[in-house]
Amino acid sequence: MLQSLHVKNLSLMEETEVEFGEGLNILTGETGAGKSLLIGSISLALGGKFEKEMLRKGAESALVELVFSGENPKVREKLLEMELEPQEDDLVILSRKMQVGKNICKINGETVTARQVKELAEVLIDIHGQHEHQSLLNKKKHMEILDSYCGEEFDVIACRVEQEYFACRELRQKLTEETLDEEAKAREQSLAEFEYKEIEEANIVPGEDERLEQRYRLMSNSRKITGSLSESYQLTGNEGEGAGSALSRALRAIRSVSSYDSRLEELEGQLTEIDNLLADYNRDVAGYLEDCEFDEREFNETEERLNTLNRLKEKYGNTLEKVLEYKESRSQLLEKLADYDAYMSRLKDDLAEAEERLRTACEKLSAVRQKNASGLEQQLKEALINLNFLSVEFEIAVRPEQTITAKGYDEVEFMISTNPGEPLKSLGQVASGGELSRVMLAIKTVLAERDDIDTLIFDEIDAGISGRTAWKVSEQLDTLGHAHQVICITHLPQIAAMADRHFCIEKSNRGDNTITDIHVMEEEESLGELARLLGSDALTEAALSNAREMRTQALKHKEAE
């Protein structure tokens, strides 16, 4: 669950620390006090979009930090999957430092990407925004909800459908690209034959170009190399004033006296070693000079061969290996064109088989959807009745369509009737804003049990409701709070009265600055806030009495469960 939230320099919040509890956490406050800003800060920590206008006036950066308890095995599994070390106390700390043009996200102190934060957030928390229920007007959302309910069996088949769909699309594209008329086929064949023959006649040997380039450089610079080596040979040789001749004379001189002293023998040994090294050098130079004797014919042949290989590399690949690969591709193309009709027939057969596999996978996927639709229908109907839809009928229609997509061939639509005798109609045709909000709460309640997410956040789930319906919503939130941590922003006293932990968000002036702050309320202060929500300008005894009565009713519900 979400243990704490720390916000610094974000909009009207200078620095705020909130410690949430188990069960139902309720946030209330005057309109404009910054209730949604608090939930928005949580969204920012989880990778939401940051705008420079969100930065508090005069501040260079903003910070949001969330601390979760990570006892949920799925959280630990996700951390390990992301190659992030869980902490010994099972805490998960998410932080985000925001500056204009720069953001730093961290998980347990390790810098990560926004994508990684969002990936982890999927198993930590579920946020229901103010207008999210409007997404129920889109039938694509209905399929998304049903699919998320279906579980692992569905996920395996859905993955197969997606793979088969893209396999079919690739084969259709290949069939379109490779369909040729006789004239185009003849052109392709002629070009492929020419290219294959050109490479074949070159008799390419891999690595040949590198050896020839080295030989060519040697031959191109042979005159300079020969002149320099000859001069070196003369200077170090045994003729005339060469170093070899001088060294021989020096060696004879020291040998004439080396027998008189052991140290002279050591000196003689050193000079002998030098003489041997110089002799080896001269032999190597002489051998190299012999190898440098190139004739004009060899030079021209090497140059011509290199030109041929380089031209082929320019046309068919940057290396000889790539040129040979291209030759193989031309061979395969010629083989295909030689029996073109049979090749196209095989391609069509492959497509037909792939389409059959796709349709079979779609049928299995549809069967799983329909099986789970009946279970979800029943659970949602029960949840809607608990939310004061007393005569509700609810159905999830799963209809096969002709068009197949990567998600199968089904169209999913939520159908509802809220009055006795009325036919089932599409959710968007019947439900009002308040009804949509309750339907979304019912969906979140059912899916939360299936997804096993610890923390659920509702930003004004009470839009468009009042009276008895508001009580029913509060009771449903309380029931949900027994299995999950629920954080809810509300302006209705019926929902606030059900709080296990009640927070007040206030806006105040400090000098020239406006500050939004939040604090947890004790019982008496909470009763005063309930009285305000009931519409009382002054905390009269009558207003407080109404607030106490509402709180007592809420506590009786809690005790009864």
Image (tube, grey):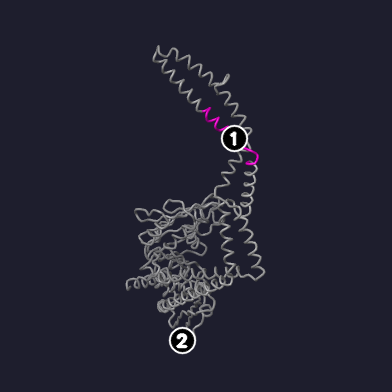
Asked where in the image residue 90 lies, by quadrant, the reply is: bottom left
Amino acid residing under circle 2: Pro
Q: Position of residue 210 (x, y in %)?
A: 57, 45
Q: Left of 176 or right of it: where is 155?
A: left
Within-10-Å neighbours for mark 2: few <14, some 14–19, many 20+: few
Q: Position of residue 367 (x, y in %)?
A: 44, 78
State the residue in front, 514 or 160: 160
Asked where in the image residue 549 lies, by quadrant, the reply is: bottom left
Distance in Å between CA atoms under marks 2 and 1: 106 Å
SS label for mark 2:
loop
Residue 100 in view, yes or no: no
Circle 2 or circle 1, nearest the eye: 1
Work out which quarter of the rendered image holds the N terminus and state it. Answer: bottom left
Work out which quarter of the rendered image holds the C terminus and state it. Answer: bottom left
Picture residue at 56% right of the left edge, 63% below the top: 332
Eyeballing the image, is 251 above or below 281? above
Q: Residue 121: say if magenta.
A: no
- Residue behind mark 1: 292
Within-10-Å neighbours for mark 1: few <14, some 14–19, many 20+: some
Amino acid residing under circle 1: Cys
SS label for mark 1:
loop
**Sequence-first tag of 2 and 1:** 1
- Residue behind mark 2: 420
Q: Position of residue 409 (x, y in %)?
A: 51, 76
Determine the residue located farthest toward the right in the rendered image.
183
Q: Which residues are magenta?
A: 281-298
State the residue in front, 129 or 216: 216
Q: Left of 343 or right of it: where is 79?
A: left
Q: Position of residue 243 (x, y in %)?
A: 54, 21
Determine the residue located farthest toward the bottom in the rendered image.
421
State the residue in front, 391 or 358: 358
Q: Left of 69 or right of it: where is 517?
A: right
